[in-house]
Image (cartoon, rainbow, N blue to C red):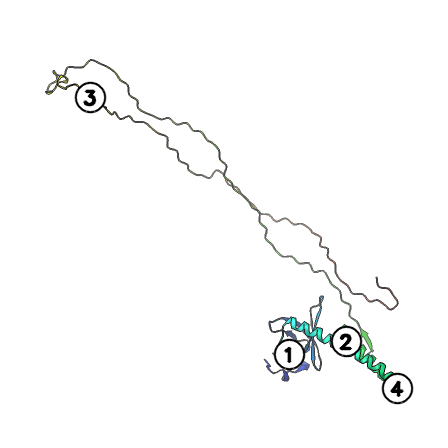
Amino acid sequence: MDSDSKNIPWNEIIKKDAVGINHEDFGKIQEVGSVSILTKKGFLNTEFFDIPKDLVASYDGNKVYFKLNEEEARNFSKRNSSLVTEKEEKAEDSSINQSKITAEDSSINQSKITAEDENNNLSTDYTSIDNKNNDIVIPLMSEELVVTKREVTDEVIITKKPVTETKTEQVQLMHEEIRIERRPASNSKDSPGNSTTKEDIPPIESKTEIKIPLKREEVKVTKKPYVKEEIIVKRQPVTEIRKISEEIITEQIVEPGNVYT
């Protein structure tokens, strides 16, 4: 990469890419003047940059690197445009004063100034001159509608919510109850090996409680989840035709004497 702007081959950088300090695209170089470089960016929405030559940082054979960003390049272009306007006004005043001094010299100088102004105007409007036929070439630009497709993702939300219902089941439970029966006391004296009889047990002297265990069954309820059914969600492509309408700009030429509508 050439790091010295003085050694840059200015004739070779025409149509080369112009790049700013933040890798910003300034388009391609169109003209190299004595003090500035003209670049063109874009095709439909065209933008031109008029950048001083001393702001060239380097040239690597394919790209020309400038020492400013895109906003600074626009400011330089606006400043240069103002300077050109001031020079044209001064040239016009000078031609008027010169015409008062010498009519013949004024005619000659005026023709030169007019030719220069025409060239400047052509350069400003980015027209060109066919030197072979001495014709002025004015490009007419137009916009074309370029429709492309891009894939986006939408979402369809399927919600599962709990629904409470009451379910009744029947279950058979067992429990024990007591039943009291009365019968005559049997004489245990006749029983062999029994040395104690019921008559030997003294009656109780206070209230006595006798606990008799009774068994019963209780209901125990548990919940067990299971898959009742399955829902199948299928995605299928559907094609539709949509009309796209957009305004575009087309340049037309207005001949002298005609009213532009």
Q: Residue at x 76, y 74 (%)?
A: 124
Q: How many marks?
A: 4
Crowd rating for badge 4 (residues with CA inside 10 Å; few <14, some 14–19, many 20+): few
Residue extending furthest front? 206
Q: Disc 3, disc 2: CB below 8 Å?
A: no
User: Relative to the observer, which residue lies in front, 133 or 31?
Assistant: 31
User: Mark 2 — residue?
Assistant: 85
| Badge number at residue 206 | 3
Between discs 1 and 2, the one toward the N terminus: 1
Q: Reading the chain from its start, which is encountered first: label 3 or label 1?
A: 1
Q: Which residue is mark 4?
A: 102
Residue 147 to residue 39: above or below: above
Q: Earlier in the sequence, mark 3 or mark 2?
A: 2
Amino acid on which disc 1 is placed? Leu
Describe the element under mark 4 as helix, strand or loop: loop
Relative to 35, say whether 231 is above or below: above
Q: CA distance from mark 4 to mark 2?
A: 26 Å
Which label was assigned to residue 55? 1
Q: Residue at x 63, y 75 (%)?
A: 68
Q: Camera-side residue: 73 or 193?
A: 73
